[in-house]
Amino acid sequence: MSDEALMIFWLFLIIVLLMFMLWHTNGVATRKNAALRQSLNEAVSQKQELIEVINKQDDEIAVLKEQANTDALTGLLNRRAFSRAFERMINLLRFDSTTSERRREGVFYALTVLLIDLDKFKSINDSHGHSVGDEVLQAVAQAIQAGQRDSDLVCRWGGEEIILALPNTSREESQAVAEKIRREISALTFSVTELMVTASIGIACTEYRLDGGVLIERADEALYRAKAQGRNRVEMAV
């Protein structure tokens, strides 16, 4: 074989080897890319699954928080949640400059409490059963809640008692709110057609002394007077 032919042979062999190496390299790169894409897809899928798990846990936590803060029967705040929110409301009112200025004008009551008690509720349970009693509580709670502002607090205080905390509410306004609630309760209808429910309401307002415990005690005393004077009426704390 001549030198020229030998050179051509080696050049050909080198070209073939280079082509093989290029093909092999491309194949390896393709397989690596495919593996990388699969890994990325798996990572994206795992991330999505993790997000779904976290969202589900967040939903479950939100449900648990709501259950911890609300009365199971009526959906109103329970007593513990009300006590916390009531304390925050008082603290905010103490440091609110608008409240202080309007107090000085002598025309403003910073906070009002309404204590509502359904009249002769035990007789409803005794005569018609607890399922009807539950129906009454749910209907009353819904009627009261529907008429309140976002800033108001509405709580099932215990048994057939419901308490409202109304910030930035005058004596005249609170009297009107209470009378409206009393009328709405007496107008409710139930599955027992002959059943009529009434409520007695005690009101306490404070202008200067923002003491939640005292305010609730005064509302309770006013409620007691409403009961003693014949029920189905509104009484203001003196």
Image (cartoon, helix red, strand yellow):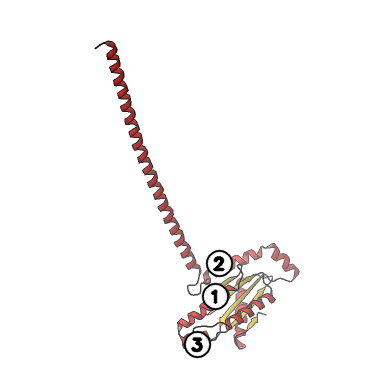
Graded by Cα atoms within 10 Å as few (under 14), some (14 to 19) or many (20 or more), the crowding at tag 1 reads some
**Can you tell which quarter of the image residue 196 is in?**
bottom right
Label 2, on which residue? 84
Gap in angstroms between the C-alphas marked 2 and 3: 33 Å
Q: CA distance from mark 3 to mark 1?
A: 22 Å
The kind of secondary structure element at disc 1 is helix
The residue under label 2 is which amino acid type?
Arg
- Look at discs 2 and 3 and give the one toward the viewer: 3
Q: CA distance from mark 2 to mark 1?
A: 22 Å
- At a point 62% along the width and 78% down the height, the residue shown is 219
Which amino acid type is marked by label 1?
Gln
Name the disc covering residue 123, or none. Answer: 3
Front tag of 3 and 1:
1
Please tell me whether residue 14 is drawn above or below residue 59 in the rendered image. Answer: above
Indicate which disc residue 142 carries. Answer: 1
Q: Residue at x 36, y 40 (%)?
A: 34
Total marks in image: 3
Q: Quadrant of residue 166?
A: bottom right
Q: Secondary structure at mark 2?
A: helix
Judging depth in this view, the residue of 131 and 10 nearest the camera is 10
